[in-house]
Image: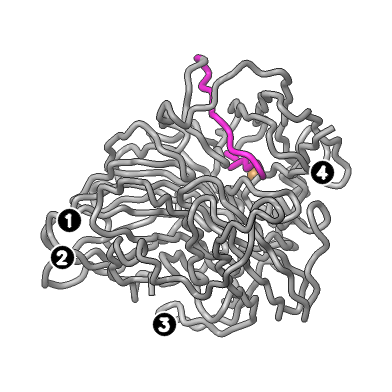
Amino acid sequence: MWSGSSIGRRAFLTGTLATGAAALTTGAAGRGVQSTLRKHVYDANVREIDLGGPIVKTWVYGDRLPGKELRVRAGEPVEVRLKNHLPADSTIHWHGLRIANAMDGVPGVTQDPVRPGEEYRYVITPPDAGTFWLHSHGQLQTDRGLYAPLIVDDPDEPGDYDHEWIIVLDDWLDGTGTNPEEVFHHLRSGGHHGGDYDDPCLGHLGMHLGDVHDYAYYLINGRVPEAPRTFTGRPGQRVRLRIINAAADTIFRVALGDHRFRVTHTDGFPVRQRETQSLLLGMSERIDAIVELGDGVFPLVAHPEGKHGTAMAVVRTSGGAAPGPHAHPRELDTCPLLGTGFVATDDVTLTGRPDREHDAVLTGDMHHFIWKINDAVFGEHTPLPVRSGEGVRLRYVNRTMMPHPMHLHGHTFQVINPDGGFGPRKDTALVPAKSAVDAFFVADNPGDWVTHCHNEYHMAAGMMTTVVYT
Ligand SMILES: [Cu+2]
């Protein structure tokens, strides 16, 4: 339903997307508080998927790409059953949600993997409204098609817009004569070639921006540019775009022809609003932006930064021919804003002096494709200890020549800028080459939590460690 069609905001708020509800008792035993536990099922399947011409056999939730969006309300519990029909172990991770450790979906850390033919019941209560996503945390499974948007609504949020559109970006190779395991094997056996990157705006990000140059397609909402999704509205309407980068190895630059973005949120949390003509999203970052629709037909383009190709959707408010698959709006050539370049609004800014400081030093052996944190691959790592109640400064120190989108589970962090000022509130920060990002968080969610690079190939090659409560 959400893919491609324009959906009135009211439809969501009246709950038309609820797929099932059952009364149950929550809260303290015997209090008899009535609530509803909305129930959802995510079947992890092998399916043939039409990307808008190319047909690929791949792994998806349900029978579509992206999987059906999970839409929940802040503070309300929701049950999701993962049914694993894959020929491999799997789990679901709820990216960006500060939920109970046992529900976090990291195999071998927070749960046993869900075996083929088995199912697993997750019950999650998302505390924060915003744009999130869910994806498998199994080895290289997100670079197949195991992902879906996860939107948390706040019924009290004013919502100064007429429509909202969910925009999911992806790099695609599965079922095109190769698959993620083959690509990973190729990288491990010395098939790595960076490709130089030199952009006047973004040169500081790194010498190269990705490791995988075998992507056959770049997709918006599961479609190639030759058969794009079309979003429709009326001139003058305000639309909230919820942009999610679900790619495994690709940073995207996003622009909408003849429009400006008014950015409102990064990784779900509100920021001091800024206007820009283009945006840059590292893997697993999200940006929400308001656009005021012009009159016409416009290309919404996501350029795979440092790579060849394009992803595209179409925004239509009147008749006329749709832009072709190679449309290149001039806005794409402006200097884009990065997620880490924003400033959180005061109400969500995490303040406080760190009681504890940890470094996560990122290094890589390009030739053998081994990526490490604090000189160890995951499994041989030394956990980073914290105590409940502490303020923690986690400094991601990047000693490599490429940027890494670093993600922390179970918490969200305040980005502290080099000058000591506040940046945005996030769960994933793109750390430029030969640079560092300071992430301040409050240790308020006990458990063993992973922090890792969201380049899926880097994570598979070891770039993950744990934060543990002692
Ligand atoms: Cu990385």
Q: Position of residue 3 (x, y in %)?
A: 38, 71
- Alpha carbon separation for disc pair 4 and 1: 49 Å
Identify the residue position indicated by label 4 in the image.
Answer: 377
Residue at 30 percent of width and 72 percent of height: 5
Amino acid type indicated by mark 3 = Gly
Residue at 46 percent of width and 46 percent of height: 281
Identify the residue position indicated by label 2 in the image.
Answer: 317
Q: Does label 1 or label 2 sit earlier along the sequence?
A: 1
Amino acid type indicated by mark 1 = Gln
Residue stretch rendered in magenta on the structure = 403-419
Q: Does label 3 or label 1 sit earlier along the sequence?
A: 3
Identify the residue position indicated by label 3 in the image.
Answer: 53
Please tell me whether mark 3 sits on a helix, a strand or a loop: loop
Magenta segment includes 70: no
Q: Does label 3 or label 4 sit earlier along the sequence?
A: 3
Which sits in the foreground, 55 or 10?
10
Which sits in the foreground, 374 or 72?
72
- Alpha carbon separation for disc pair 3 and 2: 25 Å
Displayed-image quarter of ligand 1: top right
Amino acid type indicated by mark 4 = Val
Identify the residue position indicated by label 1 in the image.
Answer: 237
- Alpha carbon separation for disc pair 3 and 4: 40 Å
Q: Is residue 106 left or right of residue 295?
A: right
> Which dot, 4 or 1, sits closer to the camera?
1
Whether label 1 touches label 2, CB < 8 Å: yes
Please tell me whether mark 4 sits on a helix, a strand or a loop: loop
> Which dot, 3 or 1, sits closer to the camera?
1
Q: Quadrant of the C terminus?
A: top right
Q: Is residue 161 left or right of residue 95?
A: left
> Which dot, 4 or 2, sits closer to the camera?
2
- Alpha carbon separation for disc pair 1 and 2: 9 Å
> Which dot, 1 or 2, sits closer to the camera?
1
